[in-house]
Amino acid sequence: MAVMGNDEETERMRMESIHQGNTFDKVRANCGFSLLKGKEILTTPLPAEEELEILRTQVDPNRYLIGR
């Protein structure tokens, strides 16, 4: 849903980029802990075709995690 980072000052998790189709409120509601909002939240870029191929054929060839 998003990419998190660590806020060095507070030692809390901070959202740094959000995957397309999600909102900060939706991610916060699903993370189970208090989440900080970064100063600038970027949109996570979509994976390249080569990256998808590696995920589908090497990381999760049976599509247990990625989906079918």
Image (cartoon, rainbow, N blue to C red):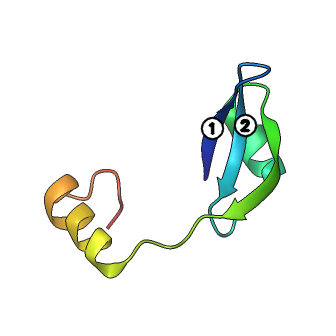
Position of residue 49 relative to residue 32, above or below, is below
Residue reaching furthest front?
9
Instruction: Give the residue drawn at x 71%, y 62%.
Output: 42
Residue reaching furthest bottom?
49
Given residues 57 and 68, the one toward you in this image is 57
Q: Mark 2 is on which residue type?
A: Arg
Q: Position of residue 5 (x, y in %)?
A: 63, 38
Position of residue 36 relative to residue 66, above or below, is above
| Residue at numbered disc 2 | 14
Q: CA distance from mark 2 to mark 1?
A: 5 Å
Given residues 36 and 60, the one toward you in this image is 36
| Residue at numbered disc 1 | 5
Q: Position of residue 3 (x, y in %)?
A: 59, 48
* Mark 1 element type: strand
Given residues 30 and 36, the one toward you in this image is 36
- Answer with the quarter of the image where residue 60 lies: bottom left
Task: Count neighbours of disc 1 (C-alpha within 10 A) and say few if under 14, some if 14 to 19, many if 20 or more.
Answer: some
- Answer with the quarter of the image where residue 50 lies: bottom left
Left or right, 56 with reference to 24: left
Instruction: Give the residue drawn at x 31%, y 67%.
Output: 68
Q: Mark 1 is on which residue type?
A: Gly
Q: Can residue 31 be seen from the camera position used here?
A: yes
- Asked if the residues shown at circle 2 and circle 1 are in contact, with their CB atoms under 8 angstroms apart, the answer is yes
Q: How many marks?
A: 2
Position of residue 33 relative to residue 39, above or below, is above
Q: Can residue 22 be seen from the camera position used here?
A: no
Task: Count neighbours of disc 2 (C-alpha within 10 A) and say few if under 14, some if 14 to 19, many if 20 or more.
Answer: many
Q: Position of residue 29 (x, y in %)?
A: 77, 39
Q: Position of residue 15 (x, y in %)?
A: 71, 44
